Amino acid sequence: MHWLVATQPVGPARFNAELVAGLPEPARRYFLYTIAPGTPLYTVANITMIGRFGMGTKADPNYLDMTASQTLAVPAGFVWKMSARRGLLHLSGSDSECWTRFWLMGLLPVARMGGDPDHRRSAFGRYVAEAVFWTPAALLPGPGIDWDSVDADRARLVLSHGELSQSIDITVAPDGQPTEICFERWSNANPEKAYRLQPFGGYLSAFQEFAGFRLPTHVEAGNHFGTERYFPFFVVDVGDIEYPHD
């Protein structure tokens, strides 16, 4: 987390509408809604959240109450630390583009993954999508970032970093507020436990302002978005979002 924070731009430029004037109209609306004029364009955020984490299925969600903190630094990476409980059951651990490690009761390992191309590709999809939520300045036009228009109310972001590339479709309201995202995520969340591209997405609401950014504080997301199998296993309310800097 300290290393990711160190990638924060020093003395960043400030936002103005000219930075997005050449973008497709729904993408331009997205930025004009999420970033106020004059906002320093910080791209690294520390986020605290509470909510529910589903350990089951759509038919039997098996939600645990959770608290979590995250450092998000697109395109460098992310680290998410979570602690979840239901009754005497306690699940804790962390997730990043390099590892997933979770324990029951602090002793019994229940998830040990990472260090391979499949895990990294899946994690990349997650944190590019979360940049749409919480670090829009990281998605402004620049190297490795392309925007296109899907239709009048949907913009498509394509972010490339090294050998990885991820596209995200963002639905925006007439005023530019992003209301949902969807994308094809490399995932093994399926009965065969086989990695493949499958729909992932969620809904954004309860927008608040943080240091000049207007961002969602309620997010519901999960696998198989847009299908009958959609299960929002990640349901969170944000407590705070900070952009650490000198």
Image (cartoon, rainbow, N blue to C red):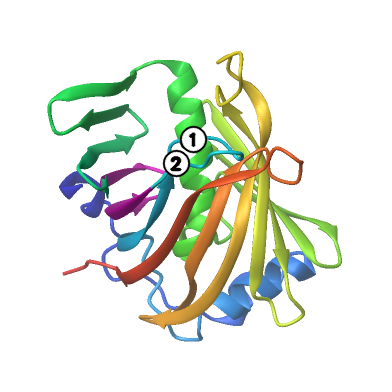
| Coordinates of residue 141 in the picture (x, y in percent) | 59, 59
Label 1 environment density (alpha carbons within 10 Å; few <14, some 14–19, many ≥20): few
Q: Are marks 2 and 1 in contact (CB under 8 Å)?
A: yes
Whole-percent x, y for residue 149 in the image = 80, 58
Across and down, in percent, residue 113 comes to 34, 20
Instruction: Say what amino acid the circle numbered 2 marks.
Output: Asn
Mark sitting on residue 56: 1
Q: State left or right for residue 109 relative to residue 32.
A: left
Q: Nearer the viewer, residue 161 or 51?
A: 51
Where residue 135 sits, quadrant-wise, is bottom left
Mark 2 and mark 1 lie on one chain; the one further toward the N terminus is: 1
Which residue is at a point 67% across and 26% down the rendered structure image? Answer: 197
Q: Nearer the viewer, residue 183 or 144?
A: 183
Q: Nearer the viewer, residue 177 or 81?
A: 81
User: Residue pushed farthest bottom?
Assistant: 37
Does residue 81 belong to the magenta stretch?
Answer: yes
Q: Secondary structure at mark 1?
A: loop
Look at the magenta stretch and give its main secondary structure: strand
- The residue drawn where x is 50% and y is 30% is 122
Figure quadrant of residue 42:
bottom left
Q: Can I make out residue 135 in this image?
A: no
Q: Which mark is residue 176?
A: none
| Callout 2: SS | loop
**Is 61 on the left or on the right of 108, as rendered?**
right
Instruction: Tell me where the magenta segment starts and ends, as one range.
Output: 64-83
Q: Quadrant of residue 9?
A: bottom left
Q: Residue at x 33, y 18 (%)?
A: 115
- Which residue position is annotated with label 2? 62
Q: Amino acid at mark 1?
A: Gly
Quadrant of the rendering where the C terminus is positioned: bottom left
Crowdedness near tag 2: few (<14), some (14–19) or many (≥20) residues, C-alpha within 10 Å: some
Q: Is 207 drawn above or below residue 172 in the view shown? A: below
